[in-house]
Amino acid sequence: GLSKQRNDRPPKKTTRSTASCTKKEDVFVALWHFDKVLLQQYLSSGNDTSLPKMIDKKMAIAHGILGADGCYSNADIHKQWNDKKKIPILESEHVVLVPTFYSVTEAFNDIAKATVSFEDFQLVRNAETKLQARPSIRSSTISLCSSQDCNGQSNSLISNLSNSKKRKGPTLNMDSVRSIQSLPKRQCTEYLNTLHSSVDEYKKWASTEINRLNEKADQLDLYERLLGEAQVKNKQIELERDAACKELKESNDCKFDEDDILEKLKRMGGLNRISLVSKNGVCTDPNISRQLYGFRDFEFCIDFLETVFEIKYEEPIQSTISAGYNKGLTDIEQCLLTLVYTNTRWGYDILGLMFGVASVSTVGEYIIKWMPLLGERGDMMSSLLMFMDEDSYETLEPKSYKEVGLRKVGALVDGKDFLTETARVDRVINCAQASNKMHASAFRILTWSLACGAVMERTAAFLGRASEKGLMNTWGSLGRLLFPLLYLILGDKGFDNTAGCYTNYNTTLHPSFLTNAQFSKEQVNHNIHVCQKRYSCEVVYSRVTGVGKLSGVFRKEWFPHFESLVGWAHGRANLCYGYLQEVDKD
């Protein structure tokens, strides 16, 4: 065992150094080169910024940095021997803490963070230094020059002052004022001139600094004023809220009757269930009523819904609905909610919030129930062709048509493409949506309207790739285009040669095609008359797109309701407007 200990001892020095020992400068290593366990163990307090050179082996094992899973191995162990005794004894084993971490990514990240922290620290130190800047006179222990090198000493002093980069103020490198006075007159004058220029320079800097600080002070005053105004406003809002809560509490304590509470809710305004459904709520404004429900007169809207759907109007008594059987919205409220859905692009959540319905699925059930009913009633009001006879056409014939010789005009036909979002899940539908008129995805319909502007027939909605003549052939094959004999149809050039689509082969009158070098006088007059009298069909489509959902791009989640929306829009066009062209009452 003794020999083993002697063999384990480090070899003794065989030579003796005779060179003089020189003191070496310290070298610093960045802390991110060391394991994070060491940094957390020794630098967690934040006061110390250095690591020990070595730690005890047992402590290293306890920290988990020595061994297979650690960053140090047996090669890093330093064995300390006790040579004072006759038999060498292993006194202790320590682990030398050498840098082990060399991750380039971590190094760049730490350097970037340290750079930002250092820049922030420098900004703070610079600000503190500027605030504490004062003119100072610093003295240094230098000996006065002799008469032989006096000029050289003076020149060096002056150059040092003029080349100084410090901006805190002038600096005198002399022991005292008496030392300055002891200089020769010429040298003293040069020194004082240099000192004077330094003082002027400091004054300029001080003036600039004062202006900058004044600007900062003005900004702080502005921020303080704005903050004060915001605090006053917040305090006022809190007072109003407290007053409203107090009033509500008093109303509950006093047990006002329901009529008084409802009257207060109506006066509060805003879009809630009571103000939206009540006849003296927010919809007394014609513009609000038109934007939400599509009717300028809200009372007329209520009467219309009661007559058409055979439902009864009831004044709401609660701003929200409660759970339970027969505790939801009434039929008239459900219908009004669906009308708001047709005229806005809002989602179910907003509609539920307005009408006091917390569940989005409940709002969807209301719309699924009432949207087909609205579309059906709209088609009833706009499908008039089967009820028309020759006497009806003559009665509704506009006076302006008679003046230009356009007699026996049965209808005006025109097509309309509604822009839609593109269906991406089916390639066939994707291609079939392409419209050659809009150069985008669309739905296409045809509409026949009387010369006075009333809608009398429309096709169902088709995908935009179907041509207008194709739609007309399909609709005519179903026997839907039954006009009296010898009556004309006004249309554009796209409806040329479509007489075979009508049951009685009604001719389509359209602007002339250019067959010669130029239009003749008769063709020009004919085109003017036909085009001027066809403007009413364009106005019909502007009324149809007055329904908010049909204006703009139609979203994919609305596709199931498109047919119902188009039917309701055509029916509303006949309901809410009068004649577009004056009818001859004689």
Image (spheres, grey):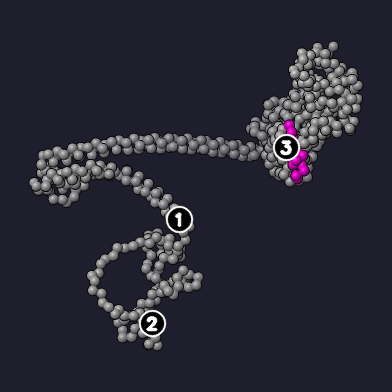
Tell me if I can see residue 454 in this picture.
no
**Quarter in which the C terminus is drawn:** top right
Q: Nearer the viewer, residue 241 or 111?
A: 111
User: Looking at the image, which residue sits at the far left?
Assistant: 147
Q: Is residue 430 magenta?
A: yes
Relative to 198, residue 579 above or below:
above
Q: On the picture, is 445 further left or further right than 140?
A: right
Residue drawn 73% across the image and 42% down it: 423
Secondary structure at numbered mark 3: strand
Q: Position of residue 414 (x, y in %)?
A: 79, 27
Residue drawn 78% across the image and 29% down it: 415
Q: Which residue is mark 3?
A: 441
Q: Position of residue 446 (x, y in %)?
A: 80, 30
Secondary structure at numbered mark 1: helix
Q: Which residue is mark 2?
A: 8
Q: Which residues are magenta?
A: 426-437
